[in-house]
Amino acid sequence: MRHGDSCASVRLSRRHFVSLLGMVAALPLAAACQQAATPAPKTEAKPAESKPAEAAKPAAPAAAAQPTAAAKPAEAAKPAPDAKPAAQQAPAAPASGTLIFWLYKTRLDPLDKHRTDRVMLWGQQAGVKTEVVEIGTSDYGKRIPAAIESKTLPDVLESGDEWVQLLQPRGLTLDVSDVFQKIDAEQKWAPAAKAVSTWPDGKQYSIPIGTSGNLLIARDDLLKEAGLTPPPKTWVDLLEYSAKAQRPPRTYGLGQALSNTSDSNRFVDMYQAYGVRIADDQGKKATFGNYQKEAVEVTQLIADAYTNKKIFPPGVLTWDQTGDNDAFQSGRTIFAFNPLSIPAWVRDNKPEMLPGIGTYLIPEGPKMRVQGVSTVSMTVRADSPLRDKAKELLLFMYDRDYYKEFWPKSQYGPTTEAHYDNEAFSQSWLKVRVDLAKNGKPINWPDIQTQALAEVQTSFVIPRMIQSVITDGKKPEEAFAVAAEEIDTIYKKYEQG
């Protein structure tokens, strides 16, 4: 499920950094890659001691009254074989220095404040000077590579799990298997959260805070007005529903990017659903070139939907990651693929619109349904001088009472079985999250996430193939041949080391 070299030196070579910089521009986010409407400015929460009044007001007061997970060693599972003893995780000596926490800022201000307050409360109670830096998702592609180069990664990084895939092989993330097992003993990880977080070596290098994945968001009210019963079950149904229900220029069927942005890689799911594979079962050798018939069929369907059915709104060829959010939220589109930040935003800003919105699993293809799961996770910098305190913070963030308030403010899905019955998941637009946590597959399944596949995606090979047919008039077979050669070259580069 996860692929990576043995841990490399923390010191990156220039070649590694350039490679990373190219890969991080638009990796597929589980979780929340579409959440920021505009790049969010850097905001910093002051250390707890300088804001006592705010620190005394956690979003979930009951959590402060009860012992935290870190204070319950009797309930903890046995640590992993290579894990540090509990005594080393919580040294008696007071911590010195400032613990920096990079918070993965969403479009949901109450959720961001809830998480920030919790981190600052821990700092106050633990006697550790703590600073929270809220960073918009669109800025991560710049901030993390710069932090790697300057050796200023935060002590705790909250991000989409794809960042772990880039940082862990370089030795930049701490093994947190002992924390993972303690949480599992108390709350039992949901199958999808456990699968995404567990590496081939059996260890965990991140602690998920929420499961996510691109789901189908639909204007059920407009579909029913057009005499259609949601949801569309197949990809062909989706394109047909879009054409029948739209009323351009007021509404268009499918608000999905066809530009050079990670959102355009959602169409890779469609190719895979038709049987196309990017590489072999080991993720070593490119096999895309073996699937011309299936790939050409999908490309023709998408090109026809754009050129003849005209179901895409103007601008999709140049959209950034927020295009789907903005178009749907303004009422201009009927369908979008999104991790649920769209209905969460509607809930908070246009509540009258929410009853007309449905959320569903991604449509099926002739071969399978490709429904990926990702997570937003917390990682600890491997060489952080506060790494033991940081692990205590990770446990503190998993307090049950804290999470009871977390889910109603969030668009994420459950990570443990203890979360399944939260009242938030009884809402019509969030019910699908529990099924996703129980049954979803790791992102890119049936292919395997590797550095080669990450480069295929961040180079936008598949979106550019589609674009060349739509905008340049290439025949699908010609565009396929170009893409197949490019994918093969990428995989051979990594095969050679």
Image (cartoon, helix red, strand yellow):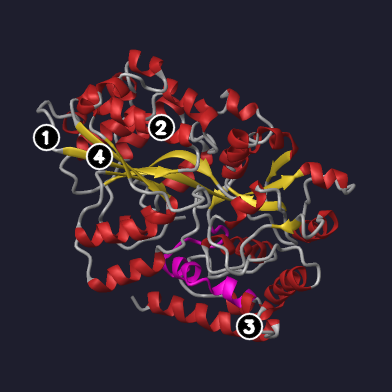
**SS label for mark 3:** helix
Q: Name the amino acid, label 2.
A: Lys
Residue receiving disc 3: 479
* Pointer 1 or 2: first along the chain: 1
Q: Is residue 457 magenta?
A: yes
Determine the residue positioned at 43% across, 51% down. Answer: 137
Residue receiving disc 1: 96
**SS label for mark 2:** helix
Give the residues drawn in magenta, as a range.
Answer: 444-466
In front: mark 1 or mark 2?
2
What is the spatial separation of the Cα atoms under label 3 and label 4, in whole angstroms? Answer: 50 Å
Residue receiving disc 2: 113
Mark yes or no: residue 257 visible.
yes
What is the spatial separation of the Cα atoms under label 4 and label 2, in whole angstroms? Answer: 32 Å
Horizontally, residue 412 falls left or right of residue 197, namely: right
Q: Name the amino acid, label 1.
A: Ser
In front: mark 3 or mark 4?
3
Q: Are marks 2 and 3 in contact (CB under 8 Å)?
A: no
What is the spatial separation of the Cα atoms under label 1 and label 2, in whole angstroms? Answer: 26 Å
* Pointer 3 or 4: first along the chain: 4
Residue that protrudes farthest toward the left in the picture: 93
Q: Residues within 10 Å of mark 4 (few under 14, many from 20)?
A: some
Check the picture and name the quadrant holding the C terminus. Answer: bottom left
Determine the residue positioned at 35% across, 51% down. Answer: 201
